[in-house]
Amino acid sequence: MDFEYSEEQVMLRKTVRKFVDEEIMPHIKDWDTNGNFPQEIWQRLADLGLMGVCIPEVYGGSGMDYNSLAIVCEELERGDTTFRTAVSVHTGLNSLSLLQWGTEEQKQKFLVPQAKGEKIGAFGLTEPGAGSDVAALTTSAKRAGDDYVLNGQKTWISLCDQADHFLIFAYTDKQQGHKGISAFIVERERAGFSSKAIKGKYGIRAGNTGELFMEDVRIPVDNRLGEEGEGFKIAMASLDNGRFTVAAGACGLMMACLEASLDYCKVRTTFGKPIGEHQLVQQMLARMEAGYQMSRLLVYRAGELKNSGKRNTRETSLAKWQACDFANQAADDAVQIHGAYGYSDDYPVARYLRNSKAPVIYEGTREIHTIMQADYVLGNREDRELNRMLPAWPFE
């Protein structure tokens, strides 16, 4: 076991933190209030090599390990959940899925420009009536010669109006249940494809989230990812990668809550002494630190399994569940420490609390992960090696 960061990882953290401090922190309050952020940020992420940080160099990425992706997500969410979400979806859910399941032709056509930041990728699984119950989705893909014709709707899709490529899951054979789901790469410019943003979100307001609509969208057979009927398996593998990034981001949110709370403890005095000297405030600070340190260990353990080319569904599920719950608690404590000011926009902790709720819900609710972990403990669930695994690091 090696708990030390490599020199490359230390430099990566410093680079992302500098970017967040200089280019996100000064503006995020306004971006959150206005419900968007400047699109130039995408180019800055690309310039820093963050859009494909753990994609092999041969496919346009930076070639770093999977825990480097965790570092990026942790530091970005320290600035705001919006930016971690962008990398989670683009890299974790889409690009890593292409790396794991794509043909060489698909990697050259779609993965390379995404890793370079020239194109943006997104992920379309959730539907109005199908969230945790993936098998309940209704989007269909019917074979028509050398094409598939897609019809259906997706919702709560991050980067819905910004992405160029979407990984869409649809039934090719409804009679087969979840074994009849297939995965497809859908380009935005396809006729019959459209998107619409959802307004009035509780949190992550600077981010673009919304619905996708497909009306007789024709895509070539070459755009199918994996074989027919492998969609459910691909979706679950994709969620392993996405959940890993969400858990890492939750560590960043805890870091932000702790930093803001410590700063406030230095300037706020009650009953004749700094509030940091009150034991119940200390209890909240200690709880933040404990959650942060434990979550980090869970995240980097999952990352090391990825680096070794091993299945990590169990470990990633536990990391996602615990880190997101700890982050939600940390944000609640941070607001409490700030008192009435924490309930206003004068301090960032109100935004942290709003942002902390969504990760407890998406990519597997806390209830789903609780059941998963119980099944592992009871021996009712066992993960086998997939027919296609993420490549181990260092990449060949």
Image: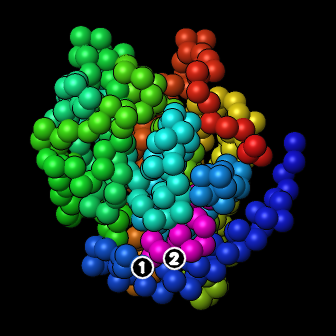
Query: Which residue is under mark 1?
Result: 40
**Label 2 amino acid?**
Arg
Q: Nearer the viewer, residue 172 or 14?
A: 172
Q: CA distance from mark 2 to mark 1?
A: 6 Å
In the picture, measured across the screen, residue 381 lies left or right of residue 139, that is right
Q: Locate residue 102, reporting x and y percent.
A: 50, 37
Which quadrant: the C terminus?
Answer: top right
- The local crowd at label 2, few if under 14, some if 14 to 19, many if 20 or more residues have their Cα within 10 Å, is some
* Label 1: few (<14), some (14–19) or many (≥20) C-alpha neighbours in 10 Å: few
Q: Position of residue 128 (x, y in %)?
A: 19, 39
Work out whether residue 271 can be spotted.
no
What amino acid type should be assigned to the residue bearing mark 1?
Answer: Glu
Mark 2 and mark 1 in contact? Answer it, CB < 8 Å: yes
| Quadrant into which the N terminus falls | top right
Residue in the image at 64% along x and 80% along y: 18
Return the mark for residue 44: 2
* Image quadrant where residue 17 sits: bottom right
The range drawn in magenta is 41-54
Q: Is residue 353 above or below residue 166?
A: below
